[in-house]
Image: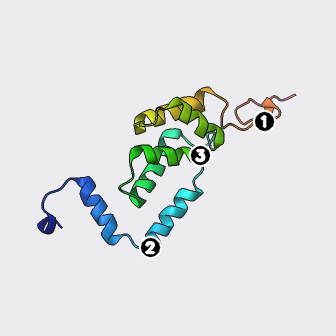
Amino acid sequence: MRQDHGKHDWLWRKSEIIKKWANNHWRFKMENAFEIAILNSERDKSLTWSLKQKEKLSALNPDMSDSMINMIISRKGGGEIENAIKFRCVEPCSTEDYINSMKDIITRTRIGKTWTRNPMESKMAPKISR
């Protein structure tokens, strides 16, 4: 590849490798993995989940911009989280700003968390023996 095209950076070589050797089965597998993954703020950490989704999308579409990837990933979080991130981030937002705002929204608000009827039923509450 280097003999044919000369010296290029890693991103260019990565996109050429994906174009040449990525077959339909691999694309189908990556698309399904992206579609199945939904953000659960109580189970997943926002940094690792976002970076995994970004890797999957950039592998499928290497020409996609970061702002487009962030917009698609925010849709996977659900309606309330998506709207909160859109209001928090300005449109040409870097991935770092996007992940930091998602982390702040998830940790500091009740958005995306499930409601429990009795706080004593949660796993974090200590068990009281009578």
User: Helix or strand or loop: what does disc 1 sit on?
Assistant: loop
Measure the C-alpha gap from mark 2 to mark 3.
26 Å
Measure the C-alpha gap from mark 1 to mark 3.
19 Å
Residue at the spot 59% in from the left edge and 46% down from the top edge: 39
For marks 2 and 3, give the one nearer the viewer: 2
Q: Name the residue under label 2.
A: 24
Amino acid type, label 1: Thr
Above/below status of 36 relative to 101: below
The number of numbered discs placed on residues in the rendered structure image is: 3
Within 10 Å of disc 2 (Cα), the crowding (few <14, some 14-19, many 20+) is few
Amino acid type, label 2: Asn
Residue at the spot 31% in from the left edge and 70% down from the top edge: 20
Q: Name the residue under label 3.
A: 39
- Screen quadrant of the C terminus: top right
* Numbered circle sitting on residue 116: 1
Q: Give how far across and how far down residue 37 sits, in percent.
A: 57, 53
Q: Which of 111 and 123 is in front in this view?
A: 111
Q: Give how far across and how far down residue 121 sits, in percent.
A: 79, 35
For marks 1 and 3, give the one nearer the viewer: 3
User: Helix or strand or loop: what does disc 2 sit on?
Assistant: helix
Within 10 Å of disc 1 (Cα), the crowding (few <14, some 14-19, many 20+) is few
Q: Which of 45 and 25 is in front in this view?
A: 25
Residue at the far right: name it: 130
Q: In this view, does 109 lie to the left or right of 86?
A: right
Amino acid type, label 3: Leu
Instruction: Report whether residue 51 is seen.
Output: no
Tell me which numbered mark, 2 or 3, is placed earlier along the sequence.
Answer: 2
Residue at the far bottom: name it: 24
Above/below status of 12 relative to 45: below
